Image: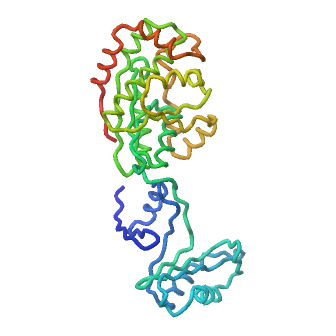
Amino acid sequence: KGIDFLITKERDYLVLKTSKPSSAVETLKMIFGISWFARAEETKSDMKSIEGRALKMAKYIGPNETFAVRASRADKSFPHTSMEIENMIGKRIDRKVDLSKPDRTIHVEVKKDKSYVYSEKTEGAGGLPVGVSGKILCLMSGGMDSPVAAWMMMRRGCYPAFVYFSSYPLVPKSDRENVIKVLRVLRGYSSRPLTLIIVPLVKITEAVTNAVEGKYKCVIGRRIMYRVSEAMAKETKAKALLTGDSLAQVASQTLDNILSEDDVLTMPVLKPLIGMDKRDIIRIAEEIGTYEISKNIKTSCPIHTGKPATKSTPERLAEEERNVKKLDALIRKAIKEAEVVRI
């Protein structure tokens, strides 16, 4: 993002120096694996310099606010104890002290060759750094759910690649561009580029529509997308698939249908939204910045007509799939024609 920085490692934390602190703060809020951070002032490790920095920060304590000073010493040769540092600074601040629940806290950390003074801790994104938990492949509809699912697993340290099944011209061409826009938002949470695999689905859609009983078309479509996704996952060294399924939110996401869909796979499918209400998913989408884009993307199943089945069995669906001519060849062709976009 054009921010210059230098990172050094202290005993208990990392120190980031930059000439653009305000921009750095906004970026740090989006980096998974950070519990909290503070915008600190660096000063010499002598009491006069430390007091000067602390009193400068104390000017921002309101007349009706309480405060506390918290000090720690990594350098035990410093001539004052932590409590003495707190008392020496505190007695020079003309505000009411509250050591249990202060409105403001001034923190002092004394090192051997320098000290840090800061007053506000900013909550980080938490979680784990992206990539430490391994690679996954996210089935990306671009709607509300799958971006939230991807964000949640990124927060748990997964590095996602994405597969989008394009049903153009059965759905608007703008859906593809909106999916890319959503991934650009998610890219802000990753230190590494994201990969989108776009798979043409129209030929498979036509074959399923012409051969399968109406109520099973959507569930069979998902089974086919799972097969394609697993093949892509193995190629990209992903260890699991990821979907935005939420139990009973739509017809294809009943327990029976989930069982039938997952039956075609040999690798695990992560479903972090499975127990969430739609309003909870929307709330997260708003917080992470994907909502305004996702709400404009059509996510209805392009290969479903009439009332979809809410109950199915793997055996019944396998029987229906045998009616689809050259299905394996169509799947191989779709994989071969897939387009890769780097974001």
Up-down relation of residue 77 to residue 181 (above or below): below
Nearest the viewer among 34 and 53 is 34
Up-down relation of residue 194 to residue 21 (above or below): above
At x 34%, y 68%, the residue is 6
At x 30%, y 29%, the residue is 339
At x 50%, y 20%, the residue is 301
Query: Residue 272: percent from the left, percent from the top?
Result: 54, 39
Query: Residue 80: percent from the left, percent from the top?
Result: 54, 91
Q: How is the image coloured?
A: rainbow
Q: Residue furthest left?
A: 336
Nearest the viewer among 141 and 274 is 274
Nearest the viewer among 187 and 330 is 330
Up-down relation of residue 121 to residue 152 (above or below): below
Screen quadrant of the N terminus: bottom left
At x 70%, y 71%, the residue is 101
- Tell me how many marks there are: 0
Query: Residue 233: percent from the left, percent from the top?
Result: 36, 33
- Horizontal side, residue 211 vs residue 105: left or right: left
Query: Residue 231: percent from the left, percent from the top?
Result: 34, 28
Screen quadrant of the C terminus: top left
